[in-house]
């Protein structure tokens, strides 16, 4: 006779160090994620704008490294690994990249530590300011390194030439899921060496293998346009209109939804606790 759900939960509590109905490590990760997500959702408008702008600058730093390595070696994989410098800067500077805002703040919202309106504000401001910060920083790159124009044009055209096909759609979904997963991995460690390794690994996978990422690739396209590449903002906008939603599918459906289901008991407990606190304070639930 197989044990029922209650027997399994009782056994886990007996073996673990906490009273949570899931493994201790998972419970610790859940609570830290909810706390971090609530902090992101509660940022002021000024903090959101500055954080997003610096996110675009950090990505631009990674693009500068990527272009230098690609120009010197011709290897997209090595160039992708070099791009990890920008992702490492994002982590250490506590900047924000649009696709990093899937798992962490959503767990805070479903646990009732924030609202869906706050989440939409976070997404919209971060995406726009990432693009603006990247546009400005790559303008400086184009001025400082005119010899990289050919490499920029080749890279940018590679993002645009495929159009929307099953292959490119899969590349966009994979980009969203990969960035979301590696963000979760980085959030689970306090070791800067491990964080740097995760950043390099993420750049190697997303940029080195040619995945399509709306924010990252857009900044490359902007850099190419600054050098006079025959790419219009209309072409970029049409491309971004299908890439960014598919990035969101990858981050939300492939990674975030299963993670929420895995910690469903913790979500329910946290929601009940927040409802209890609101009731005690006379606030609507």
Image (cartoon, helix red, strand yellow):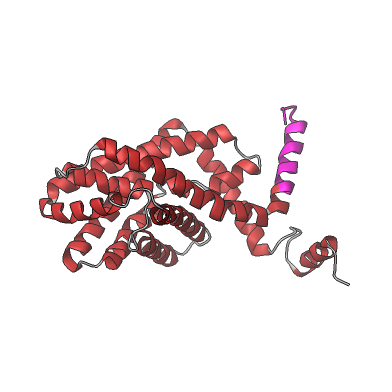
Is residue 96 visible in the rendered image? The answer is: no
Residue farthest toward the bottom in the current orientation of the protein: 1
Residue at figure coordinates x 49%, y 52% from the top left = 250
Can you tell which quarter of the image residue 135 is in?
A: top left
Q: Is residue 6 left or right of residue 33?
A: right
For the C terminus, the quadrant is top right
Chief SS of the magenta region? helix
Residue furthest right as drawn? 1
Above or below 70: residue 281:
above
Q: Could you tell me if residue 252 is visible in this image? A: yes
Q: Is residue 64 left or right of residue 55?
A: left
Please state the horizontal and vertical placement of residue 232, each as a whole percent of the image. Answer: 23, 38
Q: Write the start and end of the magenta stretch as one range.
A: 268-285
* Residue nearest the viewer, comparing 191 with 152: 152
Nearer the observer, 247 or 127: 247
Give the position of the N terminus as an image quadrant: bottom right
**Residue at position x 20%, y 53% in the image:** 152
Residue 119 percent coordinates (x, y): 53, 37
* Front-most of residues 55 and 69: 69
Residue 58 among those drawn in magenta: no
**For the view shown, which residue lies furthest in the left direction?**
147
Residue at 55%, 32% (x, y): give it. 117
Image coordinates for residue 18, horizontal then vertical, percent = 73, 61
Number of marks drawn? 0
Residue 88: percent from left, percent from top: 37, 58
Q: Is residue 276 above or below residue 96?
A: above
Q: Is residue 82 above or below residue 130?
A: below
Magenta stretch holds residue 269: yes
């Amino acid at each position: 006779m197989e044990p029922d759900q209650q027997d399994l939960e009782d056994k886990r509590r007996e073996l673990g160090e906490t009273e949570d109905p899931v493994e201790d490590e998972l419970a610790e990760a859940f609570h830290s994620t909810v706390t971090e997500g609530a902090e992101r959702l509660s940022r002021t408008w000024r903090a959101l704008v500055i954080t997003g702008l610096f996110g675009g600058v950090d990505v631009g730093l990674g693009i500068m490294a990527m272009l230098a390595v690609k120009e010197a070696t011709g290897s997209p994989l090595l160039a992708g690994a070099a791009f990890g410098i920008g992702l490492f800067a994002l982590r250490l500077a506590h900047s924000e990249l649009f696709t990093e805002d899937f798992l962490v703040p959503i767990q805070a919202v479903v646990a009732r530590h924030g609202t869906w309106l706050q989440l939409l504000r976070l997404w919209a401001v971060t995406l726009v300011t990432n693009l603006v910060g990247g546009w400005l920083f790559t303008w400086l790159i184009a001025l400082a390194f005119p010899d990289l124009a050919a490499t920029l044009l080749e890279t940018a055209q590679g993002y645009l030439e495929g159009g929307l096909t099953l292959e490119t759609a899969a590349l966009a979904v994979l980009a969203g899921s990969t960035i979301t997963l590696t963000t979760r991995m980085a959030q689970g460690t306090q070791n800067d060496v491990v964080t740097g390794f995760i950043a390099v690994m993420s750049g190697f996978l997303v940029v080195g293998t040619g995945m399509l990422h709306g924010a990252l690739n857009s900044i490359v396209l902007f850099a190419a346009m600054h050098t006079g590449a025959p790419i219009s903002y209309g072409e970029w906008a049409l491309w971004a209109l299908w890439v960014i939603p598919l990035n969101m599918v990858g981050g939300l459906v492939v990674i975030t939804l299963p993670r929420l289901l895995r910690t469903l008991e913790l979500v329910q407990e946290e929601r009940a606790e927040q409802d209890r606190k609101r009731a005690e304070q006379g606030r609507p639930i």
